[in-house]
Image: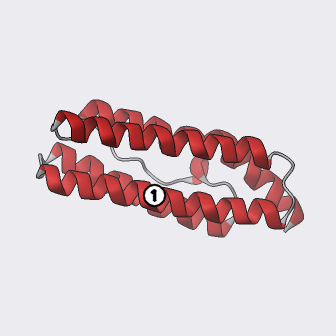
Amino acid sequence: MKDIVWGEILSVGIDEIDEDHRKLVNIFNVLNHAVTDAESPDYLAATLEELINCTVWHFSHEERLMLKYRYAEIEEHKAEHRELIASAKELQQAILAADKPLAHEHIEFLERWLTGHILTADLRLGSYLSQVM
């Protein structure tokens, strides 16, 4: 599987959010390489945990900005955040329960999980914030 390449298409136009997204993309790419290189299950689990934890932190960061700038779609956006974290944690638990390492199909899921949110909800948020900040 190819890395996610950071570019203008993923930029929401708000530097602090884009910087968070670059970090998440970097961790995703580390995880992607770890699966391809058949790293140890413990390393894969630790890297997935890092991706989830950084995502939780990032979502809190976005939600603070939404509150500060009175984003009208905050409840819908927060609901999407909760759904995304829940789906990542479900994947994590399923992998741990099955005692199997992450595989390429999990990476594909996580790629859609990460880029799908950026390219939809976060682009709308970035558009709004660029008008009010």
Is residue 56 something that shows in the picture? Answer: yes
Q: Which quadrant of the rendered structure holds the N terminus? A: top left
Q: In this view, does 56 lie above or below 10?
A: below
Instruction: Give the x, y percent position of residue 7.
Output: 53, 53
Instruction: Give the x, y percent position of residue 105.
Output: 29, 30
Local SS, label 1: helix
Location of residue 91 (image quadrant): top left
Is residue 118 something that shows in the picture? Answer: no
Q: In this view, does 123 lie to the left or right of 46?
A: right
Location of residue 82 (image quadrant): top right
Q: Please report the residue visible at 36 percent of the width from the left and 34 percent of the height from the top.
A: 108
Instruction: Give the x, y percent position of residue 132.
Output: 88, 64
Q: Which of 128 and 102 is in front in this view?
A: 102
Q: In this view, does 66 lie above or below 112?
A: below
Q: In this view, does 102 lie to the left or right of 81?
A: left
Instruction: Give the x, y percent position of residue 133.
Output: 84, 69
Q: Is residue 45 above or below residue 103?
A: below
Q: Please report the residue visible at 66 percent of the width from the left and 39 percent of the height from the top.
A: 120
Q: In this view, does 21 lie to the left or right of 48?
A: right
Q: Residue furthest top?
A: 105
Q: How many labels does the image show?
A: 1
Q: In this view, does 54 lie to the left or right of 129?
A: left
Q: Nearer the viewer, residue 94 or 130?
A: 94
Q: Residue furthest front?
A: 97
Residue denoted by label 1: 24
Q: Please report the residue visible at 19 percent of the width from the left and 33 percent of the height from the top.
A: 98
Q: Is residue 79 above or below residue 16?
A: above
